Image (tube, rainbow, N blue to C red):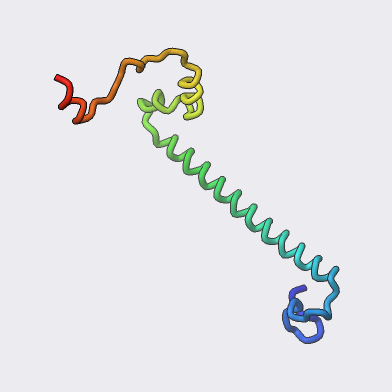
Protein backbone atom coordinates (compact mmCIF):
# COMPACT_ATOMS: atom_id res chain seq x y z
CA UNK A 1 0.00 0.00 0.00
CA UNK A 2 2.79 2.44 0.73
CA UNK A 3 4.86 1.91 -2.44
CA UNK A 4 3.95 2.31 -6.06
CA UNK A 5 3.42 -1.04 -7.76
CA UNK A 6 5.21 0.14 -10.90
CA UNK A 7 8.29 2.04 -9.72
CA UNK A 8 8.67 1.25 -6.00
CA UNK A 9 8.68 4.90 -4.90
CA UNK A 10 6.32 6.08 -2.16
CA UNK A 11 3.05 6.42 -3.98
CA UNK A 12 2.22 9.69 -2.24
CA UNK A 13 4.93 11.31 -4.42
CA UNK A 14 2.93 10.63 -7.61
CA UNK A 15 0.82 13.77 -7.41
CA UNK A 16 -1.84 14.01 -10.09
CA UNK A 17 -1.51 10.37 -11.16
CA UNK A 18 -3.29 8.93 -8.14
CA UNK A 19 -7.01 9.53 -7.85
CA UNK A 20 -8.44 11.60 -5.03
CA UNK A 21 -10.41 8.60 -3.71
CA UNK A 22 -7.23 6.52 -3.39
CA UNK A 23 -5.50 9.39 -1.60
CA UNK A 24 -8.37 9.81 0.86
CA UNK A 25 -8.43 6.07 1.55
CA UNK A 26 -4.69 6.09 2.21
CA UNK A 27 -4.93 9.13 4.49
CA UNK A 28 -7.84 7.58 6.39
CA UNK A 29 -5.88 4.36 6.87
CA UNK A 30 -2.84 6.29 8.12
CA UNK A 31 -4.99 8.32 10.53
CA UNK A 32 -6.68 5.16 11.84
CA UNK A 33 -3.29 3.52 12.40
CA UNK A 34 -2.06 6.59 14.30
CA UNK A 35 -5.23 6.75 16.41
CA UNK A 36 -4.93 3.04 17.23
CA UNK A 37 -1.30 3.51 18.25
CA UNK A 38 -2.17 6.46 20.51
CA UNK A 39 -5.07 4.56 22.10
CA UNK A 40 -2.80 1.59 22.78
CA UNK A 41 -0.17 3.86 24.38
CA UNK A 42 -2.80 5.54 26.56
CA UNK A 43 -4.13 2.16 27.67
CA UNK A 44 -0.62 1.01 28.57
CA UNK A 45 0.03 4.22 30.53
CA UNK A 46 -3.26 3.87 32.40
CA UNK A 47 -2.47 0.25 33.24
CA UNK A 48 1.00 1.23 34.45
CA UNK A 49 -0.41 4.05 36.62
CA UNK A 50 -2.96 1.66 38.11
CA UNK A 51 -0.30 -0.92 38.92
CA UNK A 52 1.94 1.73 40.51
CA UNK A 53 -0.97 2.98 42.60
CA UNK A 54 -1.83 -0.56 43.70
CA UNK A 55 1.80 -1.21 44.61
CA UNK A 56 1.97 2.04 46.57
CA UNK A 57 -1.28 1.18 48.36
CA UNK A 58 0.07 -2.29 49.23
CA UNK A 59 3.26 -0.81 50.68
CA UNK A 60 1.34 1.77 52.70
CA UNK A 61 1.40 1.28 56.46
CA UNK A 62 -1.85 0.24 58.14
CA UNK A 63 -1.55 3.18 60.52
CA UNK A 64 -1.77 5.61 57.59
CA UNK A 65 -5.07 4.31 56.20
CA UNK A 66 -7.15 6.75 58.25
CA UNK A 67 -5.36 9.59 56.49
CA UNK A 68 -6.12 8.28 53.00
CA UNK A 69 -9.70 7.07 53.59
CA UNK A 70 -11.52 9.88 51.77
CA UNK A 71 -10.70 11.16 48.34
CA UNK A 72 -9.70 14.75 47.64
CA UNK A 73 -13.11 15.43 46.11
CA UNK A 74 -14.91 14.20 49.23
CA UNK A 75 -12.96 16.65 51.37
CA UNK A 76 -13.59 19.53 48.97
CA UNK A 77 -17.33 18.81 48.86
CA UNK A 78 -17.45 18.63 52.65
CA UNK A 79 -15.72 21.99 52.97
CA UNK A 80 -18.06 23.61 50.44
CA UNK A 81 -21.16 22.27 52.18
CA UNK A 82 -20.03 23.45 55.60
CA UNK A 83 -22.18 26.36 56.81
CA UNK A 84 -19.94 27.12 59.75
CA UNK A 85 -17.56 30.06 59.65
CA UNK A 86 -14.95 28.80 62.05
CA UNK A 87 -12.32 31.23 60.88
CA UNK A 88 -14.29 34.50 60.73
CA UNK A 89 -12.31 35.92 63.69
CA UNK A 90 -8.90 34.87 62.44
CA UNK A 91 -6.62 37.42 60.86
CA UNK A 92 -2.98 37.12 59.84
CA UNK A 93 -0.66 39.76 61.23
CA UNK A 94 2.28 41.12 59.32
CA UNK A 95 5.22 43.19 60.55
CA UNK A 96 3.51 46.51 59.79
CA UNK A 97 0.42 45.59 61.83
CA UNK A 98 2.54 44.58 64.80
CA UNK A 99 4.57 47.79 64.64
CA UNK A 100 1.49 50.05 64.46
CA UNK A 101 -0.59 48.29 67.15
CA UNK A 102 0.51 48.45 70.79
**Most extreme residue toward the front, as rendered?**
100
Above or below residue 10? Residue 82 is above
Q: In the rendering, at what x and y percent does residue 59 appear?
A: 40, 36
Quarter-of-image position of residue 13: bottom right
Q: Is residue 13 left or right of residue 40?
A: right
Identify which residue is drawn at 59% across, 50% down. Answer: 42
Q: Is residue 9 left or right of residue 52?
A: right
Quarter-of-image position of residue 29: bottom right
Above or below residue 44? Residue 65 is above
Above or below residue 78? Residue 42 is below
The one nearer the camera, 20 or 26, is 20
Q: In the rendering, at what x and y percent does residue 40 appear?
A: 63, 53
Q: In the rendering, at what x and y percent does residue 86 appear?
A: 37, 15
Q: Quadrant of the C terminus?
A: top left
Q: How many marks?
A: 0
**Most extreme residue toward the top, as rendered?**
84
The one nearer the camera, 91 or 12, is 91
The one nearer the camera, 84 or 28, is 84
Identify which residue is drawn at 40% across, 14% down. Answer: 85
Quarter-of-image position of residue 101: top left
Identify which residue is drawn at 46% across, 13% down. Answer: 83
The one nearer the camera, 1 or 23, is 23
Identify which residue is drawn at 39% across, 26% down. Answer: 67
Q: Quadrant of the N terminus?
A: bottom right
**Most extreme residue toward the bottom, as rendered?**
7
Q: In the rendering, at what x and y percent does residue 77 appear?
A: 51, 23
Amino acid sequence: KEKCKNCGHPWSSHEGVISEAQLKNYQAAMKKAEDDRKAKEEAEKAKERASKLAKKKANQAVEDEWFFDGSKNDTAVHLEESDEDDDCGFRMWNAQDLASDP
